[in-house]
């Protein structure tokens, strides 16, 4: 058992909460048994850190004290198990695609990832300025579903150009114009662009879109949270 918070392995694990160390090692932390089990199913689990008395079937595991676990975790209530997972593996794009332009709130991004899996999105493309998918709050908010979707981080201009060459139709949203959601059928190869919580989709990216969508709603409501709006659109795309 490791009991000292000054142990070199403990210091190493704690650093994996920071973006620069995550990118350097291509590893990140997952907290709680459910997330650890999901990473294990995806064959991305590298090692497990456990409190004494906890058990899991995995070859590489280390028992630590509560003080050590407190040093490593981001949670107020320390978990009984933490995993070290490898970065997600990128696949070729197929099926419907969601592009995110500078979505910066970790909770929103986590919710969007969950909705994407629920409503059949194959690939999520995170543009420049978006929150990292390995942010601890994002990881927790996905409830493990981040391991069940293809997630790519790259410039959206490049992504859209590539998607158009593959005959994708590119949609974004408009609060004043566009096709009313639910009044038409999406084409077979659809890509949807959603934007920043405050600024929406940038003009540069909007100019690359083929058509725009409008979510009909009460006059009492001016706009929707990006995670909610995304979920509504993806549901319509899925059904």
Image: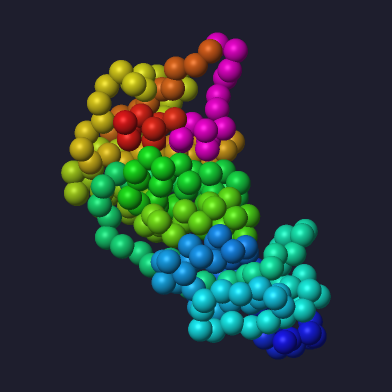
Residue occupying the far top of the picture: 219
Position of residue 110 in the picture relative to residue 213 (left or right): right
**Observer able to see residue 209:** no
The residue under the point 52% across, 38% down is 227
Q: Is residue 113 left or right of residue 104?
A: left
Is residue 3 something one can see in this rendering? Answer: yes
Q: Give x and y (percent) for residue 143.
A: 54, 53
Q: In the image, what residue occupies the spot 51% across and 65% down?
A: 37
Residue 42 % position (x, y): 41, 66
In x, y percent, where is residue 149?
39, 55
Magenta segment includes 226: yes
Q: Residue at x 22, y 33 (%)?
A: 187
Q: Which residues are magenta?
A: 219-231
Asked if residue 19 is positioned above or below residue 57 in the image, the reply reads above
Q: Position of residue 205 (x, y in %)?
A: 39, 41
Number of marks present in the image shown: 0
Q: Taking 105 as reference, is 70 above or below it?
A: below
Q: In the picture provided, is 67 more to the left or to the right than 182?
A: right
Q: How is the image coloured?
A: rainbow
Q: Is residue 101 magenta?
A: no
Q: Between residues 231 and 168, which one lies in front from this camera angle? A: 231
Residue at 74% x, 73% y: name it: 69
The C terminus sits in image quarter = top left
Which quarter of the figure is the N terminus placed in?
A: bottom right
């Amino acid at each position: 058992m490791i009991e000292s918070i000054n142990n070199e392995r403990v210091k190493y694990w704690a650093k994996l909460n920071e973006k620069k160390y995550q990118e350097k090692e291509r590893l990140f932390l997952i907290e709680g048994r459910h997330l650890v089990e999901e990473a294990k199913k995806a064959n991305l689990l590298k090692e497990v850190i456990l409190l004494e008395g906890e058990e899991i079937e995995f070859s590489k595991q280390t028992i630590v004290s509560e003080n050590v676990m407190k040093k490593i975790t981001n949670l107020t209530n320390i978990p009984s198990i933490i995993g070290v997972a490898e970065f997600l593996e990128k696949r070729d794009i197929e099926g419907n695609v969601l592009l995110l332009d500078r979505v910066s709130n970790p909770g929103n991004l986590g919710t969007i990832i969950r909705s994407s899996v629920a409503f059949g999105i194959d690939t999520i493309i995170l543009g420049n300025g978006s929150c990292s998918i390995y942010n601890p709050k994002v990881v927790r908010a996905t409830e493990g579903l981040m391991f069940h979707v293809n997630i790519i981080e790259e410039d959206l201009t490049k992504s859209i150009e590539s998607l158009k060459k593959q005959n994708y139709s590119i949609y974004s949203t408009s609060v004043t114009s566009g096709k009313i959601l639910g009044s038409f059928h999406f084409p077979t190869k659809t890509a949807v662009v959603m934007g920043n919580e405050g600024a929406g989709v940038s003009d540069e990216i909007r100019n690359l879109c083929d058509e725009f969508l409008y979510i009909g709603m009460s006059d009492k409501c001016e706009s929707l949270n990006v995670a909610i709006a995304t979920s509504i659109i993806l549901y319509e795309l899925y059904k």
